[in-house]
Image (spheres, grey):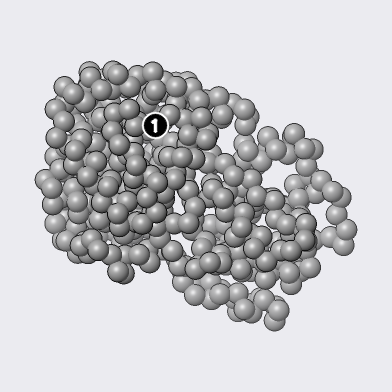
C-alpha cells in the first residue's frame, strides 16, 4: 500500500492512531512470506495503546467452510510472532464478518473489525457526474461482469437463451482471455484482463508457520454450482463467442449508462455467508440508475441500513431475502425477464418517476463519502 485509504485516514485522525503498517489482503494471500517478513520487521515488545496495524479486506473471498482460509493463515503467522490480535484493525466490505476474525477468541484480545462498503476504487468526485438524460434511454439493461464466476456464467446464459442480448450492453472480462464482446462496443479499444490464483509459497516460512494452507485459492460462492439445479452453462456461453471484454479506464467510465434503464449488477459473490458491496453496486448509484442485484442475500438490506433507497415501488425485491442461491437466482431471472417485456417508453417514464429516489441515493453516497474525508 502506498497511501492510506480515506477511511483509514478518517478513523486515524478521529482516534489519533499511529499506523505501524498496513496490508491489502490481495497483496499477501498468495505469498505469506510478505506478511511474515513485514510483521517480523515491525513488531515490538510493547506497544502504545494507539499503535495499530491496518488490514484492508476488500473485494476478495476468504471463507473456507465455517472458518476463513485467509484468517486461518493470518492468525497462524500472527501467533508465531506473538502479536496480540488487538493490534489489528480490519477494514472490510463483508458485512457481519467479525465472527470469522474472532471465532476462536474467548477474551477481549480481539481483532477490531470496521465494516464499510467504500473502497479506494471509489475516489470519485460524484458532483461532476450528473444523472444521464432519461430521454436517451433506448436499451433495457447493462451487465458489467468481471472474471468468470458461476452466477455470471448463468446470467450470460439466461440472456442468451432468452434472446435478451440485443436489449443489453454486456461487458465480460474472462480470465483465460478466450472471449470477444457485444457489437455495441468499440472492438479496437478492448483489452483482455487476466486474473489467476496461484499456489501459496510457504517454503521459506519458519517451522511454526508451515501449516499455512499451501493450496490454490478457494471461492466458497462457487461450491453451489457443483450441484446446481440450473443448467450448466460455461461451454454454452463461451462457444457462442458473442460476449466481449473491454477494460475501462476507470470504474465510472460508463458512457452507456445514458442508454440503459437498469444495471444488472453481477457482484463479486453470490452464494456467500455475508452481504457484500463493491464498486459494482456503487456505480449505478453514482450514475443515477436503478439496479437489480445478482449478489449475496440481504445486500439490499444493508444498503437500506446505510440510508439508500431501492426500487420495490416499481418491482418486487423479495429475491434479496432468499438464502437458497438457486431460488434467489431464479427470482432474479424472473424479474429481468419481466422488465425485458417493458416498452422503452415505459422504461423512460419509470426513470422519470424514480428521479427523486435516484437523486436521494446519489446525495446519500456523497454525504457518506464526504463524512469519510
Q: Quadrant of the C terminus?
A: top right
Residue at point 59%, 44% (across, down) = 115
Residue at point 56%, 75% (across, down) = 213
| Residue carrying label 1 | 310
In the image, 196 versus 294, the foreground residue is: 294
Judge whether residue 178 can be spotted in this image: yes
Structural crowding at the residue carrying mark 1, measured as other residues with C-alpha within 10 Å and reported as few (<14), some (14–19) or many (≥20)? many
In the image, residue 198 above or below residue 186: below
Label 1: which secondary element? loop
What is the x, y in percent for residue 259? Answer: 24, 28
Task: Tell whether 307 sits left or right of 178.
Answer: right
Task: Tell whether 335 sits left or right of 317.
Answer: left
What is the x, y in percent for residue 328? Answer: 32, 51
In the image, residue 150 above or below residue 254: below
Judge whether residue 148 can be spotted in this image: no
In the image, residue 181 above or below residue 306: below
Q: Quadrant of residue 287?
A: top left
Task: Tell whether 207 sits left or right of 48.
Answer: left
Residue at point 34%, 38% (across, down) = 317
In the image, residue 316 above or below residue 46: above
What is the x, y in percent for residue 336? Answer: 23, 41
In the image, 113 versus 214, the foreground residue is: 113
Residue at point 25%, 22% (across, down) = 350
Q: What number of labels is visible? A: 1
In the image, 23 versus 322, the foreground residue is: 322
Return the residue found at the far left: 163
What is the x, y in percent for residue 195? Answer: 40, 59
Amino acid at each position: 500500500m502506498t497511501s492510506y485509504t480515506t477511511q483509514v485516514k478518517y478513523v486515524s485522525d478521529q482516534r489519533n492512531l499511529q499506523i505501524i503498517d498496513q496490508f491489502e489482503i490481495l497483496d499477501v494471500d498468495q505469498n505469506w512470506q510478505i506478511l511474515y517478513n513485514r510483521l517480523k520487521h515491525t513488531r515490538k515488545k510493547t506497544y502504545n495503546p494507539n499503535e495499530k496495524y491496518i488490514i484492508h479486506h476488500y473485494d476478495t473471498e476468504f471463507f473456507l467452510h465455517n472458518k476463513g482460509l485467509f484468517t486461518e493463515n493470518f492468525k497462524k503467522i500472527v501467533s508465531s510472532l506473538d502479536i496480540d490480535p488487538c493490534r489489528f484493525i480490519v477494514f472490510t466490505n463483508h458485512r457481519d464478518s467479525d465472527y470469522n476474525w474472532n471465532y476462536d477468541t474467548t477474551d477481549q484480545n480481539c481483532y477490531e473489525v470496521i465494516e464499510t462498503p467504500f473502497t479506494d476504487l471509489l475516489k470519485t468526485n460524484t458532483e461532476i457526474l450528473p444523472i444521464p438524460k432519461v430521454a436517451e434511454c433506448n436499451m433495457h439493461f447493462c451487465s458489467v461482469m468481471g472474471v468468470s464466476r458461476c452466477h455470471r456464467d448463468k446470467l450470460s446464459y439466461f440472456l442468451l437463451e432468452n434472446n435478451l442480448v440485443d436489449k443489453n450492453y454486456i461487458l465480460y472480462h474472462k480470465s483465460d482471455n478466450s472471449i470477444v464482446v457485444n457489437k455495441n462496443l468499440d472492438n479496437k479499444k478492448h483489452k483482455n484482463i487476466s486474473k489467476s490464483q496461484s499456489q501459496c509459497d510457504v517454503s521459506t516460512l519458519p517451522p511454526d508457520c508451515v501449516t499455512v494452507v499451501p493450496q490454490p485459492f478457494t471461492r466458497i460462492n462457487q461450491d453451489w454450482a457443483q450441484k446446481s439445479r440450473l443448467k450448466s452453462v460455461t461451454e454454452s456461453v463461451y462457444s457462442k463467442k458473442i460476449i466481449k471484454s473491454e477494460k475501462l479506464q476507470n470504474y465510472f467510465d460508463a458512457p452507456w449508462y445514458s442508454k440503459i434503464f437498469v444495471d444488472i449488477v453481477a457482484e463479486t459473490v453470490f452464494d456467500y455467508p455475508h452481504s457484500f458491496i463493491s464498486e459494482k453496486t456503487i456505480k449505478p448509484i453514482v450514475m443515477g440508475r436503478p439496479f437489480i442485484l445478482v449478489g449475496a442475500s440481504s445486500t439490499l438490506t444493508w444498503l437500506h441500513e446505510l440510508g439508500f433507497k431501492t426500487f420495490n415501488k416499481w418491482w418486487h425485491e423479495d429475491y434479496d431475502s432468499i438464502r437458497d442461491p438457486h431460488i434467489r437466482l431464479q427470482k432474479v431471472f424472473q424479474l429481468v425477464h419481466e422488465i425485458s417485456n417493458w416498452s422503452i417508453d415505459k422504461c423512460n417514464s419509470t426513470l422519470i418517476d424514480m428521479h427523486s429516489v435516484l437523486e436521494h441515493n446519489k446525495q446519500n453516497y456523497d454525504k457518506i463519502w464526504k463524512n469519510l474525508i
